[in-house]
Amino acid sequence: MRFSTTMGDWWWCIMVLCICAPHPLMGAASDDSNLEETINAGALGTDVMYMRGLDARKRRRRRMSERARAQSDAWIQEEELSLLRHPPPRCDCLLSEQGCEQPKRRRRRSDKEVFGFVDPDSTGAGFNWTHITTVAWATTDELRCAAHEAGARVLLAAPTFDLNRASSSSIISSWVNQVVRMVDNQNADGIVFDYEDPLSSEDPSRASTYVTLINATRVALKQEMLVVTCVPWSPAGIDGRYYPYKALADASDLLYVMDYDTQSQELNSACLASANAPFYGMVHGITEYLELGIEAQKLVLGVPWYGYRYPCVSGTLADARYCPLEYRPFRGVPCSDAIGVQVPFGEIVKKQMIPPQWDSTMLAPFFNHVENENETNHNKLPIVQQYWYDDAQSLKLKYAWARSNELRGVGPYTFDDLTGAPAQEIQSMWSAFDTFLYDTASPLLSTT
């Protein structure tokens, strides 16, 4: 039985133009010149300034994605140079006494996924492996070993692929064969596609190529392998991504819905800081995917284990409820949140000097902190920063909704973002998964 939530008209207005962060994948360059090519020439100056700010704001997530993809490219290149033609047995698990031992790969059988991303350098230290079923961007031997010992899957980033150059089936076949060898050589359990470039609804050729690429990869990999495709928080053309989402779902084992970075534009005239991933925006986006005919069991709700730090305009009081932002016009909208900076959960809670406030509209916590400087305050004068993020309380609401709607899974970007948090906060974040995994009492009645 589906959980339903009524939203006021004001919320729909706010969410109409919210967009996620673009970060090119599979062959597209990530510099400003390519970003500018995607911008409407009629508003070039304003939009270029915005896109550069957006690129800076998203650089943490973009950087990790590019590093994971670069590692996959390196593995492919090594294979092409015959360095892995006849490789020695891999040694993912180094045991001081017994020597080398392959991971046991005791995969847990579960109808629910706790699927999340990690920093490309992550070793999995401190993870609660009793909850995790799948980790993505597993580039280190230590992480692959720890995951397999715990019965979890490890997935690699899809290597570079340029949709504009895929002119024949032979090119796709060659790329897929390389991916299959890479997955096998790296003792992995599948692949993650994370293509986030704009794609016009009037460009069916590239859209078809992307679907064909994913489907061919899924067919070529062993049956127990997993092929996952990342998609934005909503299928409604976010960042100009008019992808054939139903076809992508059919070609993939799972869709990872990136329900974060949803506040790229602010429509309210006051231009105020707000939540990274509001609850009702999540409901709206996932519902749109379901209405396309995509099965709930194909969807994994991606949640942020990071938040945003916003520099309030000069004169904002330390205890102010609202944080006015500098105006950053974009496509006729007077305000954007490109001024915000992504901050991991572990760093955010260390800044929290008093209990956070709770926004009953966004269903998310926030707090103010006076700091001496930030990336936009070069005078080093005290400035009020407002932090918005997700904690165990806000995540339980989302996990409960995901369970009520029978989604296949939930999981964060990233597991490593808890680093540095107090032990009690870390435990609360891991325990929040119980709301999705088990038939616990719904927290939806206690949101104040």
Image (cartoon, rainbow, N blue to C red):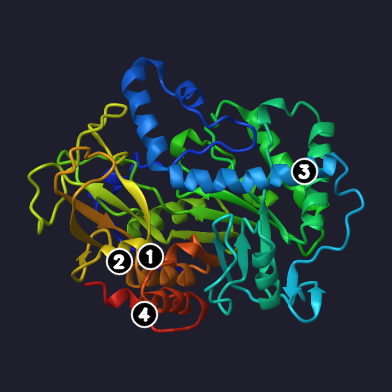
Depth check, front residue: 99 or 222: 99
Occupied quadrant, residue 115: bottom right
Q: Which residue is mark 1?
A: 346
What kind of element bears circle 2? Answer: helix
Occupied quadrant, residue 172: top right
Which residue is at 25% across, 39% downward? 376
For the residues labelled 2 and 3, say whether their Cβ atoms are less than 8 Å apart: no
What kind of element bears circle 3? Answer: helix
x and y percentages locating residue 229 in the rendered image: 61, 50
What kind of element bears circle 1? Answer: helix
Q: Which residue is mark 4?
A: 424
Q: Residue 385: tell me if it is visible.
A: yes
What kind of element bears circle 4? Answer: helix
Which residue is at 19% across, 41% downward? 325
Q: Which residue is mark 3?
A: 76
- Residue type, mark 2 in image: Lys
Crowd class of label 1 (few under 14; some 14 to 19; many from 20; radius 10 Å) = some
Pick whichever of labels 2 and 3 is earlier in the sequence: 3
For the C terminus, the image quarter is bottom left
Q: Residue 245: tell me if it is visible.
A: no
Among all residues in the image, which is located at the extreme front? 97
Q: Which residue is mark 2?
A: 350
- Residue type, mark 3 in image: Ile
Which residue is at 37% across, 41% downward? 57
